Amino acid sequence: MTEITSTGYYYRGSFVARIINGVVGIIEVFLFVRLVLELFGANSSSQFVAWIYSVSGAFIGPFAGAFSGISLGGNSVLDIVAIFAMIGYAIIGWLVIELVAFMFGTMKRI
């Protein structure tokens, strides 16, 4: 019979990596919801839509002006900046996790 035992090791880097993944995930969700709302032409006078635009606007700030949105007719807009920001934050999160893995030495990959 094979016994499965837990080693009981605690990896600090793994915990930090999970925190970073959580923060990046929350940012990505806000940007995705913004992208979908703009794609469907949501009315910005709605409180929820205005709140999403204001929160995600802080995350889009560093990428603002890089590209212009593509109008799809009516109020629908394909926000290229939001897509670019989502890719940028994913890359930045990955780089920070790799830096943490380097600083803490070997750690379990998540």
Image: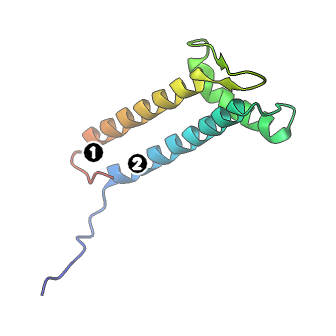
Residue 12 in the image: x percent, y percent?
A: 34, 53
> Helix, strand or loop at disc 1?
loop
How many dots with numbers?
Answer: 2
Q: Residue at x 28, y 51 (%)?
A: 109
Front residue of this view, candidates 33 and 18: 33
Label 1 to label 2: alpha-carbon separation: 10 Å
Q: Of the residues shown, which amino acid type is indicated by label 1? A: Phe
Q: Which mark is residue 63?
A: none
Q: Does 4 sit above or below residue 99? A: below
Q: Where is mark 1, residue-wise?
A: 104
Q: Of the residues shown, which amino acid type is indicated by label 2? A: Val
Q: Where is mark 2, residue-wise?
A: 16
View extreme (front): residue:
73
Q: Residue at x 25, y 51 (%)?
A: 107
Residue 43 in the image: x percent, y percent?
A: 83, 32
Q: Quadrant of residue 95?
A: top left
User: What colouring does the structure picture have?
Assistant: rainbow
Q: Does 107 sit above or below residue 85? A: below
Q: Does 11 sit above or below residue 16? A: below
Q: Earlier in the sequence, mark 1 or mark 2?
A: 2
Q: How many neighbours does mark 2 have within 10 angstroms: few (below 14), some (14-19), or many (20 or more)?
A: some
Q: How many neighbours does mark 1 have within 10 angstroms: few (below 14), some (14-19), or many (20 or more)?
A: few
Residue 110 in the image: x percent, y percent?
A: 33, 53
**59 lies left or right of 40:** left
Q: Residue at x 17, y 82 (%)?
A: 3
Q: Are marks 1 and 2 in contact (CB under 8 Å)?
A: yes
Residue 97 in the image: x percent, y percent?
A: 36, 40
**61 lies left or right of 43:** left
View extreme (right): residue:
45
Q: Where, quadrant-wise, is the N terminus in this rendering?
A: bottom left
Front residue of this view, candidates 59 and 15: 59
